[in-house]
Image (cartoon, helix red, strand yellow):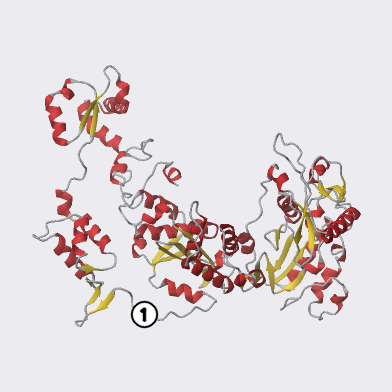
């Protein structure tokens, strides 16, 4: 109903009692009453394909004993068998297969029988036909204002089983052995086959005005006029293919609709309160399996929860192998916070691919977090915990990892669209112009350069994101930061260290005094930092010290760029076996090792290098007509700057971390790295 939500009742008489305004929509339904029968009219028709049960090679028939059930449950089994026999959905069987019957609860509180096919599913070859991603389905609804939802009646019973596979579905009861002639609940490949059927039926309408997930059909339109036409097309398809819906579970002409655990409207998408109403009464987990269950529910709605991974970390640690189950205060706090976030989740806007995106990224030692926004409205949250090796990353790399995480997880939105990325780490603004990058940074930079984006520094981004949320946040009381205090002279102290103001000239003066003066004489960064931290403190002091020492010209001249040789492998020529060379290696603390006599393969690497150099010198002599000794510097330069398959880069780049400046790469040194073709792929 336009502007409201009304369910269609079983009786058609209820349709007459509805207001005049929505009659147009109901009239469409009236035209297709045969699509909404009280019961499914007999066996389904022959379709383009049937349900198959393909088994692993060598599988023998499996026969299980029936479960014991109460007398009242026996009556329910008898009623279900009689009903299914009457419709032709099952038939008496003499199959060597047999599986027991159990009961499952329905939404209305009643119970239905279901066959325990777990043993059959274990030996069934799995059908890999994909089910659609839930978030991809919601992305199709942008701009929609009118919705209708159709739920098929016993959808699985609307597809036949291949005759040769019917005996495999046999189930055993007190009343005999029966087998299904139509697809049954509990079979492992049933969702994939039915999804395939629905996609074939609605292929021409998918991503235009129809979304399908197994037996749930959602029709969405921008106007009421469009919706009438769309609804008629969908119902016509159902009629053509003899697919039947249950009227009492269908909803028409809504401005918001429950779908796959969410409420969808033109204003956005939010958590369905009916799906999480039981969350507040969820008992504290007592075993790991219960933790899995709670995190599974919470994880389904993680796009609605800011910093989900950080909040859930105390609980997810229980899932690690070998961790004893101990319910601590931290885990209880995480449990309570997730329940609170689920029941107060914000409304997320539906994306518009015609507009640019804004991404806010943040990182800490607890995890990575990012927020995807458009025009100040939140589309989704994403977060993850740090992996073991990432805990040791410096702050710069962690913040860059958060940016990369956002680009990877939302690639299907951001690739090809303009986006602005905000981070509270200022140096990321200059990532594209940095001269010195480590291998990890260069790999990430290659990924970032695939996107049309700009990185901004925004120290107050947390407040911007908070303002964009549709839920109200608790105001944080102003308090004192721990370990900081101010003395009578107004000097701010951090414990027993003076807090240096955020003034570059003051910091530079302190660094100069600790490094350049006659009483300090250029200490290394580690010594200098430990000396300074006894008396001074400012945010990022360790990095500032390291950067100051790294650019000190005197240090670069005095300190050797490369360490001494560790060992040399050579043949047994007299020039290498002399006493002089032996004593030279002793003084250099290096090892001289000889290859086996008359076995050049011992030092094959050197022999191969010599062969390459000989070929290069021979080419120089032919090309330029010069003697080999004059061409040797050119051969050396060419070899050191050519791509080497074993290194996945040139030797010069492996040593210095950048390309050598050459006429071919004159303007790319430092700013644009040139890799071997396999470097990025191997490093992923």
| Vertical arrangement, residue 275 with respect to residue 164, above or below | below
What is the quadrant of residue 528 in the picture? bottom left
The residue drawn where x is 46% and y is 59% is: 385
Position in image of residue 175 (x %, y %): 87, 51
What is the quadrant of residue 132 in the picture? bottom right
| Vertical arrangement, residue 528 with respect to residue 591, above or below | below
Q: Nearer the viewer, residue 468 or 172?
A: 172
Q: Is residue 463 left or right of residue 30?
A: left
- Residue 626 seen in this snapshot: no
Position in image of residue 504 (x %, y %): 23, 69
Q: Nearer the viewer, residue 666 or 303?
A: 303
What is the quadrant of residue 476 in the picture? bottom left
For mark 1, what is the residue? Answer: 479
Disc 1 packing (10 Å; few <14; some 14–19; many ≥20): few
Q: Nearer the viewer, residue 565 or 333?
A: 333
Task: Identify the residue at the far right of this view.
Answer: 86
| Vertical arrangement, residue 664 with respect to residue 278, above or below | above
Q: Quick one: SS at disc 1?
A: loop
């Amino acid at each position: 109903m336009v502007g409201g939500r009304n369910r269609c009742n079983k009786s058609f008489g209820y349709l007459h009692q509805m207001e005049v305004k929505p009659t147009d929509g109901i009239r469409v339904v009236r035209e297709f009453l045969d699509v909404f029968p009280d019961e499914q009219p007999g066996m389904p028709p022959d379709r383009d394909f049937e349900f198959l049960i393909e088994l692993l090679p060598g599988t023998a028939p499996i026969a299980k004993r029936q479960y014991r059930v109460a007398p009242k449950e026996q009556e329910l089994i008898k009623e279900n068998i009689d009903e299914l026999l009457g419709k032709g959905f099952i038939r008496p069987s003499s199959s060597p297969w047999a599986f027991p019957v159990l009961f499952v609860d329905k939404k209305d509180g009643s119970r239905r029988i279901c066959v325990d096919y777990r043993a059959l599913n274990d030996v069934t070859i799995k059908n890999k036909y994909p089910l659609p991603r839930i978030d991809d389905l919601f992305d199709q609804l942008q701009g929609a204002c009118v919705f209708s939802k159709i739920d098929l009646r016993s959808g699985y019973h609307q597809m036949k089983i291949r005759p040769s596979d019917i005996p495999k579905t046999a189930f055993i009861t007190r009343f005999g052995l029966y087998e299904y002639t139509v697809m049954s609940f509990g079979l492992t490949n049933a969702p994939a086959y039915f999804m395939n059927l629905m996609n074939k039926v609605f292929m021409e309408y998918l991503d235009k005005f129809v979304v399908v997930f197994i037996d749930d059909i959602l029709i969405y339109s921008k106007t009421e006029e469009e919706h009438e036409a769309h609804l008629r097309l969908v119902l016509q398809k159902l009629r053509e293919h003899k697919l039947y819906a249950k009227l009492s579970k269908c909803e028409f002409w809504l401005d918001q609709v429950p779908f796959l655990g969410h409420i969808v409207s033109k204003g956005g998408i939010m958590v369905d309160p009916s799906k999480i109403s039981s969350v507040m009464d969820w008992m504290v987990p007592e075993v790991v399996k219960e933790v899995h269950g709670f995190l599974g529910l919470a994880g389904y709605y993680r796009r609605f929860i800011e910093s989900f991974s950080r909040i859930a970390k105390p609980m997810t640690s229980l899932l690690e192998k070998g961790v004893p189950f101990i319910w601590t205060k931290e885990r209880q706090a995480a449990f309570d916070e997730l329940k609170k976030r689920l029941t107060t989740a914000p409304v997320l806007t539906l994306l518009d691919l015609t507009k640019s995106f804004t991404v806010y990224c943040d990182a800490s030692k607890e995890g990575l977090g990012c927020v995807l926004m458009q025009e100040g409205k939140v589309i989704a949250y994403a977060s993850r915990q740090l992996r073991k090796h990432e805990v040791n990353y410096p702050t710069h790399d962690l913040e860059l990892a958060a940016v990369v995480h956002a680009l990877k997880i939302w690639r299907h939105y951001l690739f090809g669209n303009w986006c602005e990325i905000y981070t509270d780490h200022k140096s990321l603004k200059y990532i594209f112009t940095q001269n010195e990058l480590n291998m990890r940074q260069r790999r990430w930079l290659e990924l970032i350069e695939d996107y049309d984006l700009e990185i901004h520094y925004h120290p107050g981004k947390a407040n911007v994101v908070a303002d964009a949320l549709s839920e109200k946040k608790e105001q944080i009381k102003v308090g004192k930061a721990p370990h900081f205090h101010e003395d009578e002279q107004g000097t701010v102290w951090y414990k027993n260290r003076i807090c240096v103001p955020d003034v570059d000239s003051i910091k530079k003066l302190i660094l100069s005094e600790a490094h350049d003066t006659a009483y300090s004489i250029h200490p290394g960064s580690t010594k200098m930092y430990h000396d300074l931290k006894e008396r001074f403190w400012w945010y990022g002091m360790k990095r500032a010290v390291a950067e100051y020492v790294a650019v000190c010209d005197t240090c670069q001249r005095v300190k050797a760029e490369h360490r001494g040789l560790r060992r040399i492998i050579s043949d047994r020529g007299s020039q290498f076996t002399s006493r002089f060379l032996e004593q030279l290696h002793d003084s250099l603390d290096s090892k001289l090792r000889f290859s086996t006599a008359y076995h050049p393969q011992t030092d094959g690497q050197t022999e191969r290098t010599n062969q390459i150099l000989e070929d290069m010198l021979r080419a120089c002599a032919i090309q330029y007509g010069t003697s080999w000794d004059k061409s040797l510097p050119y051969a050396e330069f060419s070899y050191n700057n050519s791509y080497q398959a074993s290194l996945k880069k040139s030797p010069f780049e492996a040593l210095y971390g950048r390309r050598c400046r050459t006429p071919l790469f004159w303007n790319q040194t430092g700013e644009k790295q040139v890799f071997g073709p396999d470097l990025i792929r191997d490093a992923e």
